Image: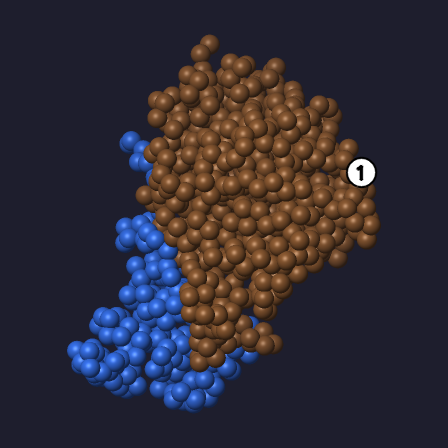
Amino acid sequence: MTTRRDADISRREFLTRLAMLSALAASYPATALQKMRSGAGTAVSPEWAGKDPWLTLAAVQEQMFPAGDDVPGADDIHAIVYLRNTLDNQAADGEDREFIFNGVEWLNDLTQEHKSKPFIELDETQRETMLRQIEQSNAGQNWLSLLLTYLFEALLADPVYGGNPDGIGWQWLEHQPGFPRPPADKTWYRLGRPVYYRRKA
Amino acid sequence: MGTDYDVCIIGSGAGGGPVALTLAEAGYSVVVLEKGPWLTGQDFFKDELACCRRSVYTPQLEDEQHVIEDLYDGEWVGEATSESGWDFWNGNCVGGSSNFMSGFFYRLKPEDFRLLSEFGPIEGANVADWPIGYQDLEPWYALVEKEVGVSGRFVDHPFAEPRSTADFPLPPTQEHPVVSRIDSACNKLGLHPLPTPRAILPAAKGERGGCSYSGYCGSYGCSTGAKGGSRAALLNRAVTTGRCEIRPHAKVHKLISDTKGKVVAAHYFDADSRTRVVDAKIFVVACQAIETSRLLLSSSGPKHAQGLGNNSGQVGKNLLFSAGGSGTGDLEYAGLSESDAAALKTRGPFVNRGLQDWYYIDDKAFGGRAKGGTVDFLLRHPNPIGKAMSEKWGEDDRLVWGRPLQQRLKSLFADSQYLRYEIFCDWLPTDDCFVSLASGVRDKWNTPVAKVRIGYHEHDLKVGHYINERTLKVMEAMGAKNIRSGVSGSPPQNLVAGGCRFGDDPATSVLNADCRVHDVENLYVTDGSFMPTGGSVPYTWTIYANAFRVADRIRSSL
């Protein structure tokens, strides 16, 4: 928990700094990503994000997709919000959800065994070592691969799904999205579902 | 005794739309039964998930699937697609898969109608001449240009097929700047780069908008109505006659025939999975090749013990895909002027270029005169998630993440434009490619699903390699880097035809020359199932043209 709280604090400080930078943009040119970050709105840290499985998953995502000066990280692309939206959705793949949640338990069991700590309390080197270790098994590799798939979706799917705020991922990769873009009432799971007619009693 | 409708059409795609429009306009009452929902342009967005990442326009494979039989160690082994994830659905909604086509339209050529006579038999292949010739279909190809809206610019070339009109009724869609590189490479090699005709409106026409050039076309639904899918181009007009009714969520599972062998009713499951019944004077099946054969095989009756039209055991036989391959090369921005790089990065206009220089091969090294194929150029599929996916795998099948992954992504997206080509050649009909019923595997309505054996003929690969070797030279001449290509016998599930071939002999065909089932007086098939051989181009224009032709025959019979 300590690590996460620290991360939250530094994140807030970071955003405050960015806001100041943004105000000074005319005289102090910000990098492209800082501009994106300043335009990406407030960081999302709802209550659920402070609890497992989301806490561990967010830490794994940040390890796999870290923020850099010119690179949006998992936090920047709201990867955990996207993942939760996707797995909690009525049309979600239930198998993916179960597999991902089970994986969090396996991972934490492993880090407890080797480092006597949960994953989120490990430093970056230890996190990397543990993830590379679970990659050795088929199940571990599939789990990490699936998380990467959802990271790509968070980075590049339409912002309406909760990731890629203000198109930050598209801007980073100089990707031009198509149009018209999906409004909230026409997301994929709201299209094409069969209409079930009520029978009269 | 009266019937509910004059005509009942099962399936609303490129095979159903022309029949619905023709007969509704001629004053007949028509009902179209479509398994999927009725989505319109208001429901189609450039959504990276809805297109290509989720089953939105097709069923969940757990609910509806196929069994695919492939060859493993000399034995045919069937695997359910719910297990393999290999999806053979192409678009189950009003308008069918024509909603999601790229709309590059080619006609067949006269020789395609008489492949056996022109090029002789090939051992192990069931090559047959068609019972009609190009001249019989040409007026209908021309009609499709007007009714569906085909834009293009005719350029004469050594293998150009005859046309009854001088040029296309609509000017070409806007062209991507990369075409100048394709043209100059082809010209240098003495080839004939051809403007690709497209079933896409460059400007508004009637109720349909013109293309918005968003750059997201193939496999995406069209929001403006510019794409000439069956719904936007034909069914909407059929409905406005007041004589055509479309019932979505209507999954026909059996056609009922009487003691004379005539079809008297279609039974379908509605959205509540209740069985409903429609009767009509004429029934038209157009569910796309695999499902059309499945429906006929599932519809046994007093005169059709083995399924409708299957007294000679021909239903489902000689299924066709499209053979060939594809390749891609990187056109790097580095070294280009800023304006050239910006032009190459353009997203929106179409890469309207194809090659038919090898439509026929006359080369001793190949083994003499033979049927070749078509090459079409396009940009890499625009879905960024699909594009990113391959970057997560590194050396030794290990995952890549962290900074190395981010560097790969940045390079993939920002360093090059990716030019792709696709080769289309005949998928020779053989005894190893057919549809039957999977007795043990059922869909969510508890009816047997289609089992598809997907064997290919080695000759298809030979032709594919011949064309690929020559296309690679075009890519090299263009300065493409990192060129990769492949020719395979794996079937592209979106290019499917055959299974109910038409012919004059009921012993070797399912349909007569009018695409009516030989021994059923009121049952027609108007999707791509009728084709005895497939030609070396995408099927849609030919399906449209033939469906208009058959609709005219049906009108004469009513």
Between B323 and B367, the residue placed more toward the observer is B367
Which chain does brown denote in the image? B
Q: Is residue A62 visible?
A: no
Residue drawn at x 69%, y 48% as measured from the top left: B358
Please state if A194 lies on the left or on the right of B135 as rendered.
left
The quadrant where residue B317 appears: top right
Give the image location of residue B36, x and y in percent: 43, 39
Instruction: Check the picture and name the quadrant holding the C terminus of chain A.
Output: top left
Residue drawn at x 61%, y 20% as measured from the top left: B520
Give the image location of residue B269, x and y in percent: 45, 33
Placement of A200 over or under A152, stated as above or below: above
Mark 1 lies on residue? B121
Amino acid type, label 1: Pro
Placement of B545 over or under B371, stated as above or below: above
Residue drawn at x 80%, y 37% as measured from the top left: B120
Give the image location of residue A110, x and y in percent: 46, 82
Between B405 and B351, the residue placed more toward the observer is B351
Secondary structure at numbered mark 1: loop
Please state if B177 lies on the left or on the right of A181 as rendered.
right
Q: Given the current orientation, which residue lies at the most extreme top position?
A: B1
> What's the colour scheme?
by chain
Please state the chain letter of the residue tagged with numbered disc 1 in the rendered image: B
Instruction: Check the picture and name the quadrant holding the N terminus of chain A.
Output: bottom left
Give the image location of residue B52, x and y in percent: 46, 54
Which chain does blue denote in the image? A
Q: Residues within 10 Å of mark 1 (few under 14, many from 20)?
A: few
